[in-house]
Structure formats: C-alpha cells, structure tokens
Amino acid sequence: AQKVTQAQTEISVVEKEDVTLDCVYETRDTTYYLFWYKQPPSGELVFLIRRNSFDEQNEISGRYSWNFQKSTSSFNFTITASQVVDSAVYFCALSEEYNTDKLIFGTGTRLQVFP
Amino acid sequence: DADVTQTPRNRITKTGKRIMLECSQTKGHDRMYWYRQDPGLGLQLIYYSFDVKDINKGEISDGYSVSRQAQAKFSLSLESAIPNQTALYFCATRDRDTDTQYFGPGTRLTVL
C-alpha cells in the first residue's frame, strides 16, 4: 500500500538556523513521483518540487534543497538559513505511475521560525 | 491573476443547507480535483474529473456531488451540509506532462 509518513509534527527554530523536514514513503511501484508543497498561514497550497523515482539527483533551489534516497525511501527537505517567512506547514506527497490521479499526502510538518 | 481560483473563499452555513463551491482554472489542464483538508491531517480526495464527461469518485465522496461544466470549471456541491463537513476545501488541476497538481487558494467552509 502507498503511504507517506512525516514523523515530525512540529519543528521550531530560530531564524538563520538550518532545518530538515523528513519524509518517508512506501510504494510497490518502481515508477513514482514525489512532491513537496508549502501551506503558509494564509492557507493556500504552493507547489515546491516534483521528483520522479528515476532521478536521485539532489536538487537545490536557493535556500531550499531536497535529498532523495531510494535506499531508505526518503525524500527530505532542508531549508538553509531559515527565515520567518518560511513558517508554514509543509506536506510531502506521493503518486504512482499507474494511478497518478491519486496524490497521497503526509500529515504535514508545521515549521515555526522565530526571529 | 491566479491560475486556479475558488469561490467563495469563506462560507458559513447551517446544517441541512445546500452549498456549492466553485473552481475555475486558466491553466488549460484537462484533469481537475476536489480535496478536503481537516486540521492536522493531509488532504483527502473527494472527486476528480478527466473532462466534462468523465467524473470519478475519490476516497470520501459520500455526501458530495460534482459538476464539470466546462474544461475550465469544476464545482463541488454539498446537498445537505452537516457539521463534520466543516473543513478547508481545495480545487486542483493536473499538468499531464509533469503529473504535478496545482492547487487553488482554498475555501474555508463552516457548517453550524
């Protein structure tokens, strides 16, 4: 069965600290897609990144970086030098090749960045 | 302008009332989705549509219905609202090339 686990319910850091949000997934498919979304206090869901299962290259976008490791079924998200504007709930999600309409979400990690 | 819009953004209603939530998109995507989010939980899929003639139930379709009026419009109805349908509702579209879903701003619905 497909499942996404975000074990960290809430994380608090002080501005400029680095923080890593964990995501562990379960799937039987060999082809699948992983996503991260950000939900700021205003409530909307903002797409951050998509990664397919054949691309294990890590990705960096400004202060954001993602570490995909198939060996541990993890797709972790690191924010470097966190800022107050990074405060949000972050969701990891999974879809499988033959059922891409079903996007399976984790329960989210609430990140609070204090000044 | 936003690519995926939802109206209303907030709604308070009473038990037993019929409610319609509307979604429009300018992304040109065929596939559209309705989700609900409850506090502390991820999103659950209610219904999805491939085109105006193709509607599919999601995980939690009971108590909901949908209508795909055009490629760009997908509405969600609660025929007789009940308090446990109080939630944040999201509409989304999917890019078939990247299999990425893009979400609207959400509608916060409260059923008293």
Image (cartoon, helix red, strand yellow):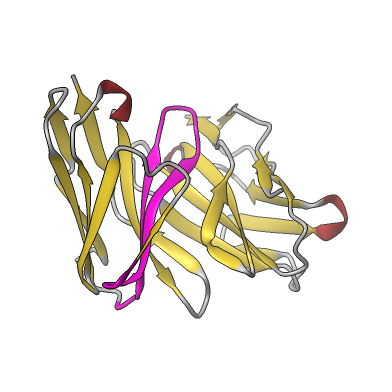
Q: Is residue A40 magenta?
A: no
Q: Is residue B50 above or below residue A38?
A: below
**Residue at 30% over, 55% down:** B104
Outermost residue to the right: A71
User: Which x, y percent locates residue B64?
Assistant: 29, 43
Q: Position of residue A15 (x, y in %)?
A: 54, 35
Q: Residue at x 42, y 27 (%)?
A: B39
Residue A23 occupies which quadrant of the picture?
top right
- The quarter of the picture where residue B2 lies is bottom left
Q: Residue A42, can we see it? A: no
Q: Which x, y percent locates residue B23? A: 22, 58
| A31 left or right of B40 in image | right
- The outermost residue toward the top is B112
Q: Which residues are magenta?
A: B28-54
Please give left or right for residue A36 compared with residue A76 in the image: left
Residue B103 position in % (x across, y down): 36, 56
Q: Residue at x 47, y 45 (%)?
A: B59
Q: Is residue B84 above or below residue B91?
A: above
A73 and A101: which is toward the camera: A101
Q: Nearer the viewer, residue B102 or A113?
A: B102
